Image (tube, rainbow, N blue to C red):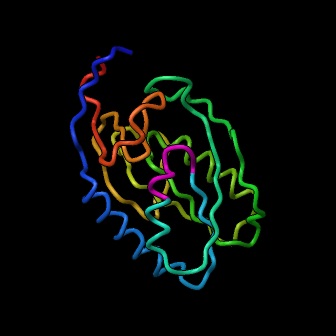
């Protein structure tokens, strides 16, 4: 990877905040009395989860899972594995999966199937971003924030080989150096 990377802003921190507020309002309406378990898919969704739960003023639990489909670089390897599974028993619980991005759909479909086998009372998906032009496996996104073009994005928790997660806006990688 070269040292010069050209980034351009796709969504500002204000646009992201407005999107998170909108999603929180929708989630609040559906989960207010259900004490759901929110499962954040690491590492990319941690900033989104953090901002989202601060907007949810009702009892909930938080879990983390880590999946891997990227070896290194910007293309999915297609081989998905659970690196870290949820620790809580989700049987009979209302579960909301929090994702940073839905790209091909393979990872989300894999993880939702994995969780379905644990028999939750309900299972829904909240995604900050969706890249419909890359969809290969259709997954139902119950709460969708932003639709993005077929570009590689970084910032607001999203990375490129662990770089750029710290950026407060979402950027398109225009030139990979």
Counting from the top left corner in percent of width and height, residue 35 is at: 63, 78
Question: Residue at coordinates 76% horizontally, 56% vertically from top-left?
Answer: 87
Question: Residue at coordinates 43% horizontally, 36% vertically from top-left?
Answer: 159
Q: How many marks?
A: 0
Q: Place residue 150 in its image quadrant.
A: top left
Residue found at the far front of this picture: 166
Q: Residue 111, relative to residue 95: is it above or below?
A: above
Q: Is residue 55 magenta?
A: no
Question: Residue at coordinates 64% horizontally, 69% vertically from top-left?
Answer: 61
Front-lying residue, 70 or 110 = 70
User: Quadrant location of the C terminus?
Assistant: top left
Q: Is residue 48 magenta?
A: yes
The stretch of residues the image draws in magenta is 41-49
Question: Residue at coordinates 45% horizontally, 46% vertically from top-left?
Answer: 102
Counting from the top left corner in percent of width and height, residue 133 is at: 33, 40
Q: Residue 170, relative to residue 93: is it above or below?
A: above
Counting from the top left corner in percent of width and height, residue 160 is at: 42, 30
- Name the side, left or right, on which 62 lies relative to 166: right
């Amino acid at each position: 990877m070269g040292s010069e990377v050209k980034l351009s802003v796709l969504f500002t921190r204000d646009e992201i905040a407005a999107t998170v507020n909108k999603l929180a309002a929708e989630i609040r309406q559906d989960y207010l009395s259900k004490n759901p378990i929110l499962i954040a898919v690491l590492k990319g969704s941690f900033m989104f989860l953090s901002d989202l739960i601060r907007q949810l003023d009702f009892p909930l639990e938080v879990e983390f899972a880590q999946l891997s489909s990227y070896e290194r670089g910007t293309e999915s390897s297609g081989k998905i594995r659970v690196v870290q599974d949820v620790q809580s028993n989700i049987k009979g619980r209302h579960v909301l999966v929090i994702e940073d991005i839905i790209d091909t759909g393979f990872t989300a479909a894999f993880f939702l199937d994995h969780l379905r086998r644990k028999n939750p009372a309900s299972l829904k998906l909240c995604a900050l971003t969706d890249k419909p032009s890359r969809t290969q496996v259709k997954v139902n996104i119950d709460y969708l924030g932003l639709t993005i073009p077929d570009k590689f994005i970084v910032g607001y928790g999203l990375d490129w080989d662990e770089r750029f997660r710290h950026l407060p806006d979402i950027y398109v990688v225009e030139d990979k150096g």
